[in-house]
Image (cartoon, grey):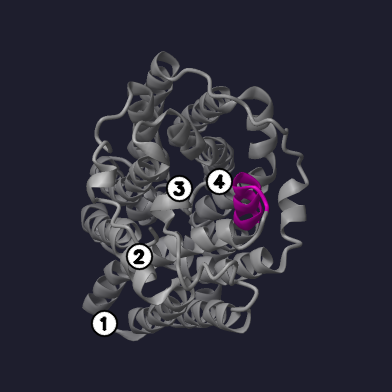
Amino acid sequence: MPGKDPFDEGAGSLLHQPKAVWATAGASVVAFMGIGLVDPILPSIAKGLEATPSQVSLLFTSYFLITAMAMLVTGFVSSRIGGRKTLLLGLALVVVFAALSGTSSSVGELVGFRAGWGLGNALFVSTALAVIVGAAAGGSAAAILLYESALGLGMACGPLVGALLGNASWRYPFFGTAVLMAIGFLCITAFLKEQPRPAKKTSLLDPVKALGHGGLASVATSAFFYNYSFFTILAFTPFVLDMTPYRSGAVFFAWGLLLAVFSVLVAPRLQARFGSLKVVGGSLVLLAVDLLVLGYGDHTAAIVCTILSGAFIGMNNTVYTELALGVSDAPRPVASAGYNFVRWFAAAAAPFLAPKIEEWSDVHIPFVVAAATAVIGALVVRVRRTALTHEAEELEPRHATEDGVSAFAG
């Protein structure tokens, strides 16, 4: 039944999973940690490598630009070599490039190594959910809830780990990630058996062809503008807060906790009551208001609004992904790849443009632009609401905990 509480009796087997599922979920936590890991140490990296904020922000740009392009490759690879080998390939690339990131002697080297890291992470996270669902006990609902929990835990813990290790040296978080991912590699090697391959192999152009569907194209377009807002907060706010790694890590840890709670617990309940389109539209408008207060308020207001934005981001991540997977008849992996291919370009653009906009104007304007893109995302949902309705799913929504894929999955 739509709207079912993911924590009711039907999900009772959530904690009773095979070792293969726990190994993959654990590695997923570390993979998602890598997204926010550099947040609290961005000022330290800038100081250590004598770089400007706009140069250091390219750590996100290179990472997500490669991630976006890799969305066209992940399905092609996994449908040919299998999920287990794809996971191991992704983990191996992350181990290598995370370790190399810690050895960087210039910001250019670090940006390049983060690009390689992005490729590895794309291969891993785009495959992990399918592997967890295939190996989990208790059905897909329990498996997806476990994966969403791993996502939230990773997003929350990434800034905290980055702060704890980065307080000694900005290099240590990269080495720490390499070690943790190496442990994940060994666990998956030991506990995960190969999963059945898809009956039909995915071509490189299948995700692009899927975007020919008006509904999926509309979701991807709206998510593109939303992701610009999201990653303005993630990549630019640390410079505005100008705090020690410990304090910045604590702020983004609280941000990540709200993201996890609202993604897994709050969004499904609001969808059941109001429908997906109203939830995402309202959340985008509230995010725009939050961004304006963040940009023009005092330091305390900036901290509070940064943390509060995690609630809106968590809801949006869940609802957008469900819309992307339910609005067209394309296979879920293909629809998700096409959707992520579009939206991750905004994640690459925002970290580069926000500091540049500040250089061209002042510190307030990047947040005004981010607020405007959030509103544009809401307008796209409003104008294209008919195309976004597929078998009345926005009226009787199926939750991300029932048939969705994580917002960070491909």
Nearer-N-terminus badge (3/4):
3
Residue 202 drawn at (x, y percent): 72, 38
Magenta residues span 330-341
Amino acid at pointer 4:
Val
Q: Residue at x 43, y 22 (%)?
A: 185
Element type at marker 1?
Answer: loop
Q: Quadrant of residue 220?
A: bottom right
Residue 28 drawn at (x, y percent): 40, 37
Q: Residues within 10 Å of mark 3 (few under 14, many from 20)?
A: some
Element type at marker 3?
Answer: loop
Q: Give the label, 3 or 4, closer to the camera.
A: 4
| Residue 267's disc number | 2
Q: Which residue is mark 3?
A: 49
Please indicate whether residue 183 sits to the left or right of residue 330 in the image: left
- Residue 306 covered by magenta stretch: no
| Residue 200's disc number | none
Q: Residue at x 65, y 23 (%)?
A: 81
Q: Quadrant of residue 339?
A: bottom right
Residue 162 drawn at (x, y percent): 31, 45
Distance of label 4 from label 2 (alpha carbons): 35 Å
Q: Give the label, 2 or 3, closer to the camera.
A: 2
Please indicate whether residue 76 sits to the left or right of residue 135 in the image: right
Amino acid at pointer 2:
Ala
Nearer-N-terminus badge (1/2):
2
Q: Are marks 4 and 2 in contact (CB under 8 Å)?
A: no
Decide which of 107, 200 is in the foreground and name it: 200
- Relative to 360, does residue 30 appear above or below in the rendering? above
Q: Which residue is mark 4?
A: 111
Q: Residues within 10 Å of mark 1 (few under 14, many from 20)?
A: few
Q: Are marks 2 and 3 in contact (CB under 8 Å)?
A: no
Q: Which residue is mark 1?
A: 298
